Image (spheres, rainbow, N blue to C red):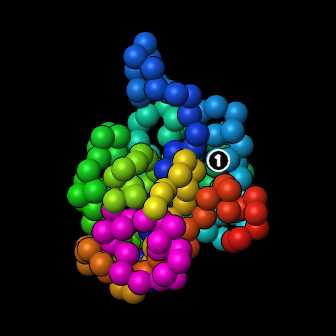
Amino acid sequence: MRRLLLLRHAKTEPASPSHEDRTRALVERGRKDAGKIGAYMDTHALLPDRVVLSPAKRVQETWKYMAGALKRAPGATTAEQVYAATPHDILGIILGAPAAAHSLMIIGHNPSLQDVALMLVASGDIDTREQLREKLPTAGLVIIDFAFDDWSKVHPQSGRLERFVTPKSLEVGTR
């Protein structure tokens, strides 16, 4: 089995013509939400073998606060192609994941993460799938399981939505 974890970066300062998009930083809520998701992952033993990050400041900071909540944070690599990725770019990263990584986490941006999640998921709880279809909020975590043990076999509609967690869902105790 292979497990894919997709995480949209946490809440950031608003976009501004005077700020370069790549340099947008997390706001206080974003830092807290990233820590909440990290703590959730740690508590539920959802630690990836490999983490791939966008080079954007908000993604790097999201990982920093998430990793700080993990007892044993895996190493992370930054991949330029995650920043302005299409769903097919994200799929290419997944297909190229090393065989030794049974679980892969990609932290990046919307709409590509939501689009690739919807492209890959064929089954799972119907209500949860509909929630994902409606919105992948900041710091939203999507976990997709694949029944095979080879990343190169990942293709559209080949995964099962194992869970979809958001900071808001953790606050109301729905997960």
Which span of residues is magenta-colored? Answer: 116-133
Question: In the image, residue 17 lies at what x, y percent?
Answer: 40, 16
Main secondary structure along the magenta-highlighted residues: helix
In this rendering, position of residue 74 left or right of residue 2: right
* Residue that sits furthest to the bottom in the current view: 147
Q: Residue at the spot x=41%, y=36% of the render?
A: 55
User: Residue 85's spot in the image, x, y percent?
Assistant: 29, 47
Label 1 sits on a secondary structure element that is helix
Q: Residue at x 36, y 50 (%)?
A: 111
Q: Is the residue 52 above or below the residue 11 in the image?
A: below
Quarter occupied by the N terminus: bottom left
Give the residue number, with chain letter if any, for mark 1: 34
Q: Amino acid at mark 1?
A: Ala
Percent coordinates x, y for residue 77 in the rendering? 43, 46
User: Front-most of 5 and 133?
Assistant: 133
Examine the rendered structure and indicate whether residue 10 appears above or below residue 25. Answer: below
Q: Which residue is located at x 36 percent, y 81 percent?
A: 122
Up/down of 78 relative to 121, above or below: above
**Are there few (<14), some (14-19), or many (20+) residues within 10 Å of tag 1?**
many
